[in-house]
Image (cartoon, rainbow, N blue to C red):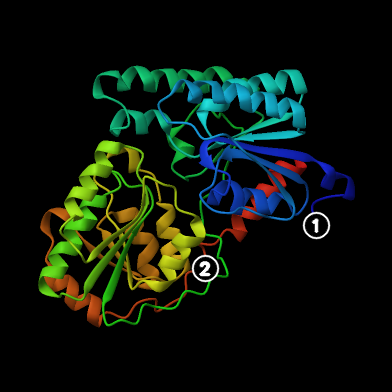
Amino acid sequence: MYFSESLKRKRIIIASLLKPIDDTRMFEKFGQTLAEEAEVHIIGYPSQGIVNYPTIIFHPLTSFARLSIERILQPWKIFKKITQIKPDILIITTHELLVIGMLTRVFLSCRLIYDVQENYCRNILYTNAFPKIIRPFVAAYVRCKEWITSPFVNHFLLAERGYDTELHFPGNKKTVIENKTKKKEIVAPKKNDGNIHLLFTGTLAETTGVFTAIDLAQQLHNLNSSIQLTVVGYCSLQSTLEKIKNTISNKDFIELIGGDQLVPHSDIVAQIQSSDFGIITYTENPSIVNSIPTKLYEYLGYQLPILMIDYQPWVDLAKPHQASITFKPSNINPKVLLDRMKNQSFYTSKPEDVFWESEAEKLKKIILTG
């Protein structure tokens, strides 16, 4: 054990602006791991499900629109709540809380940890979250904020190995805590209805490849009518959501779950367990160059065969276990894919280095003994 009895009384806040209080990284991984040794509070967006965990205290925010004055005010409401709780350690999970994190460090003398879940500057520049004309200015603002506040951050946690080389503002105060999967005890049997069930999970956006997944399913379905696709996730852009709905409106073999609502992670895990193939189809984009999708860890952890774009770093992770069939979105051969889906042996070895336990030990050592 790393910890004395007194350290168990440390009070920790994990705070997010847009992530729900039952977010898989914030709650299931960080929260549950640290709650073994400390008093843990989670502040975040309201969940779509019922959240209950005996050793974690939840503080859901009031609902607000993503583009609203209320969103601008939320960090200060979070700051007020933080000053009431008076944590020993504050973990923030977004750049939008850096300023209040800095103030908390100054006025409450607590340790400040910044969990860097995205390379926000690169994501802003190369995705369509903002109008193209203002992207450079928003990206520059975010990166400047990360640099200016970095002296006040005690330690940076990096969600991707690639961030170790991409990001310079953390200096030497950094540790990679990857988004490996925490296996959940959910039993969801396969859908034994004679169909082949494909699954696309996660953020629904152009850059995450949701339309490539739909096109892939359509081509496979044209050859084999037993092909079904379930799309599960949240779409933050209304225009993209409308495009998804219009694209699948006449395709009764495709089901959308979520869309305009966050989907509880337990529901996603149940879909993974009951499906036949997962799909990973990110579009070519500089924002993913050094990223490993969380869903890749999840599919590997639950031994779900994967239909995946031919992107070498991801192929290298899946190849030792014969977990995937790769293809190029610009040159899909549905007949070849169907033949391989039917005849290939998957998971000839069990993935081991995809689970949260290895990261959990690093997290506890950094947070509770730092």
Which numbered disc flags the more N-terminal residue, 2 or 1?
1
Percent across and percent down for residue 245 are 23, 49
Percent across and percent down for residue 288 are 34, 43
Which numbered circle lies on residue 133? none
Amino acid type indicated by mark 1: Met
Quadrant in which residue 213 is drawn: bottom left
Question: Which residue occupies the foreground of this view, 342 or 348?
Answer: 342
Quadrant in which residue 333 is drawn: bottom left
**Callout 2 secondary element:** loop
Q: CA distance from mark 2 to mark 1?
A: 23 Å
**Callout 1 secondary element:** loop
- At 84% from the left and 44% from the top, the residue drawn is 9
Total numbered labels:
2
Q: Which residue is mark 2?
A: 352
- Report whether 55 appears left or right of 136: right
- Report whether 276 appears left or right of 148: left
Which numbered circle lies on residue 1? 1
Amino acid type indicated by mark 2: Glu
